[in-house]
Image (tube, helix red, strand yellow):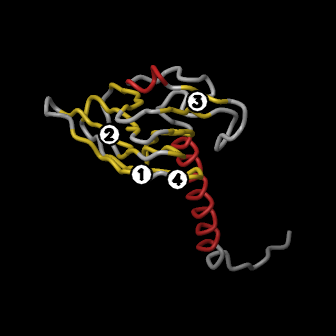
C-alpha cells in the first residue's frame, strides 16, 4: 500500500470555512423562508373579498377581481371612506419585532400597528401615506415585546382608496 504525504492541516481551515459558510447561508435561508411564510394577516391579498377583515370600512368595502391588482387577482377598494378603517386583531404573547406592510393606491390615509401591553393604554406605531396614482408600499415596524394583543389597522381618509398585499410578519 502506498501512502501519500498530503498536508491535511492546510486544507482543514478552508474546508471548515466553506462548510461554515454553506451552513450559515442555509440556516439564514431557512429562517428567512419561515419568517416570510408567517403572515399573521388572513386574506391580506383580498382574494376572498372582505373575509377576515373588521372595522367600519369593512362593512362598506368592496373588492375587485377584474384586473388592476398589484399582485394576484383581487384588491379591496373603498369609496367615500373618509375617516374609516379596516383592521385585524391578534391575541397572544408576542416577542420580537414585526413589520406591517400594505400596498395602497388612490386616496391618502395611515397604517398603524396598535399594541396592548400589561394593562397599559394601547400605543401605536404608525405612518401616514399620501394619495398615489400607482401602487405604493407603506410599512411600519413595531416591537410588541410582552404585549398580549396587537392590531393591524389601515385608516382611510381619501375619496377612493385601494389596498392590496397587506402583511404582518415577524422580523429579525
Q: Nearer the viewer, mark 2 or mark 1?
A: 1
Disc with the residue nearer the chain's start (2 vs 1):
2
Q: Residue at x 26, y 36 (%)?
A: 115
Question: Rounded to the nearest whole Å, what is the CA distance between mark 1 and mark 4?
Answer: 9 Å
Q: Secondary structure at mark 3?
A: loop
Q: Residue at x 36, y 46 (%)?
A: 97
In percent of width and height, residue 75 lies at: 60, 34
Q: Nearer the viewer, mark 3 or mark 2?
A: 3
| 156 relative to 146 in the view: left or right | right
Q: Earlier in the sequence, mark 3 or mark 4?
A: 3
Q: Which residue is mark 4?
A: 132
Residue 95 is tagged as 2
Residue count near mark 4 (Cα–Cα under 10 Å), binned few <14, some 14–19, many ≥20 = some
Viewer-side label of 2, 4: 4
Along the line of sight, the residue nearer the viewer: 118 or 160: 160
* Residue occupying the point 59% across, 66% down: 16
The circle on residue 129 is 1
Within-10-Å neighbours for mark 1: few <14, some 14–19, many 20+: some
Q: Nearer the viewer, mark 3 or mark 4?
A: 4
Q: CA distance from mark 1 to mark 3?
A: 20 Å
Do the residues under discs 1 and 4 have CB atoms within 8 angstroms? yes
Image point 58% across, 73% down: which residue?
13
Q: Secondary structure at mark 1?
A: strand
Give the residue number, with chain letter if any, for mark 3.
46
Secondary structure, mark 2, is loop
Determine which quarter of the picture holds residue 19: bottom right
Residues under labels 3 and 4: Cα distance? 20 Å
Disc 4, SS: strand
Comparing labels 1 and 4, the label whose residue is closer to the camera:
4
Q: Quadrant of residue 66?
A: top right
Number of other residues with Cα within 10 Å of mark 2, as a class: few under 14, some 14 to 19, many 20 or more? few
Q: Is residue 135 left or right of residue 127?
A: right
Amino acid at each position: 500500500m502506498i501512502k501519500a504525504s498530503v498536508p491535511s492541516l492546510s486544507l482543514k481551515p478552508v474546508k471548515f470555512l466553506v462548510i461554515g459558510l454553506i451552513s450559515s447561508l442555509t440556516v439564514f435561508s431557512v429562517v428567512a423562508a419561515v419568517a416570510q411564510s408567517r403572515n399573521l394577516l388572513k386574506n391580506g391579498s383580498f382574494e376572498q373579498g372582505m373575509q377576515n377583515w373588521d372595522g367600519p370600512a369593512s362593512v362598506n368595502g368592496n373588492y375587485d377581481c377584474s384586473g388592476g391588482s398589484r399582485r394576484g387577482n383581487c384588491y379591496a377598494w373603498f369609496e367615500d371612506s373618509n375617516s374609516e378603517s379596516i383592521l385585524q386583531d391578534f391575541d397572544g404573547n408576542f416577542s420580537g419585532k414585526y413589520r406591517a406592510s400594505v400596498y395602497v393606491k388612490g386616496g391618502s390615509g395611515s397604517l398603524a400597528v396598535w399594541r396592548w401591553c400589561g394593562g397599559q393604554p394601547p400605543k401605536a406605531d404608525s405612518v401616514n401615506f399620501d394619495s398615489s396614482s400607482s401602487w405604493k408600499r407603506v410599512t411600519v415596524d413595531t416591537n410588541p415585546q410582552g404585549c398580549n394583543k396587537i392590531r393591524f389597522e389601515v385608516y382611510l381618509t381619501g375619496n377612493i382608496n385601494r389596498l392590496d398585499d397587506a402583511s404582518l410578519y415577524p422580523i429579525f
